[in-house]
Image (cartoon, rainbow, N blue to C red):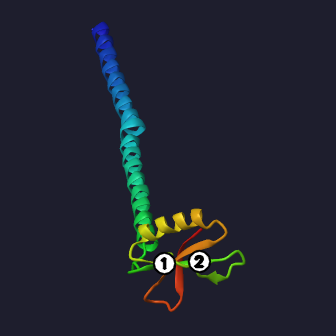
Amino acid sequence: MQLILKVFDWRTYIATAVAVISFSNFMAVLFGQTIPGIFVTFFRYAGEIIILGAVFLFALAWLLKARPHNRPKSYSVVIFDVYGKESKIADIRTEFKTHDVAWSFMKQYKKSYPLYNFAMVSKLSKSDKRTIFKYI
């Protein structure tokens, strides 16, 4: 009889030890890998979203600030001599409707008249002064 009780006692101890070990393993995996993994994944994606949002917000602010709101309706080419004073050259076109055409003519004038400097200017509606867009 005593032998049977001892065997029964060992089984109880073994079952209890297996239960404690498996529960502690479950708790170690839960608090060591599963829960921290969820938080790390959440904060990784949240950080990416915050950074991307900041980048897009900065880009939008830059685009709104950088682009001219009132585009000029016409452009003029102003000619400067060697001393930096405004001068005139006979028979050249100085009034243009588009930026690209004015810039193209300015580059051609610079090749033809290397001792002169040229500025592309326009008068914006908010200011009385002319604004220089390009200078070569």
Q: In what quadrant of the picture does the N terminus appear? A: top left
Given the current orientation, which residue lies at the most extreme front position? Answer: 91
Q: Which mark is residue 74?
A: none
Identify the residue at horizontal 41%, vertical 45% (top origin): 40
**Residue 135 drawn above or below residue 85:** above
Rendering quarter of residue 73: bottom left
- In-front residue for pair 25/77: 77
Question: CA–CA distance between discs 2 and 1?
Answer: 9 Å
Q: Position of residue 2 (x, y in %)?
A: 31, 9
Number of numbered discs present? 2
* Marks 2 & 1, CB-CB < 8 Å contact: yes
Kindly identify which residue carries mark 2. Answer: 79
**Residue 48 drawn above or below residue 15:** below
Disc on the earlier residue, 2 or 1: 2
Q: In what quadrant of the picture does the C terminus appear? A: bottom right
Identify the residue at horizontal 69%, vertical 78% (top origin): 84
- In-front residue for pair 69/114: 114
Identify the residue at horizontal 46%, vertical 71% (top origin): 102
Provide the secondary structure element on which disc 2 rests.
strand
Q: Amino acid at mark 1?
A: Thr
- In-front residue for pair 11/96: 96
- In-front residue for pair 129/7: 129
Kindly identify which residue carries mark 1. Answer: 94
Given the current orientation, which residue lies at the most extreme bottom position? Answer: 128
Q: Position of residue 20 (x, y in %)?
A: 36, 28
Q: Position of residue 106 (x, y in %)?
A: 52, 68
- Is 134 left or right of 53, judged from the image as shown? right
Identify the residue at horizontal 48%, vertical 68% (top origin): 105
Mark 2 surroundings within 10 Å by alpha-carbon count, few (fewer than 14), some (14 through 19), many (20 or more): many
Provide the secondary structure element on which disc 1 rests.
loop
Mark 1 surroundings within 10 Å by alpha-carbon count, few (fewer than 14), some (14 through 19), many (20 or more): some
Q: Position of residue 88 (x, y in %)?
A: 59, 81
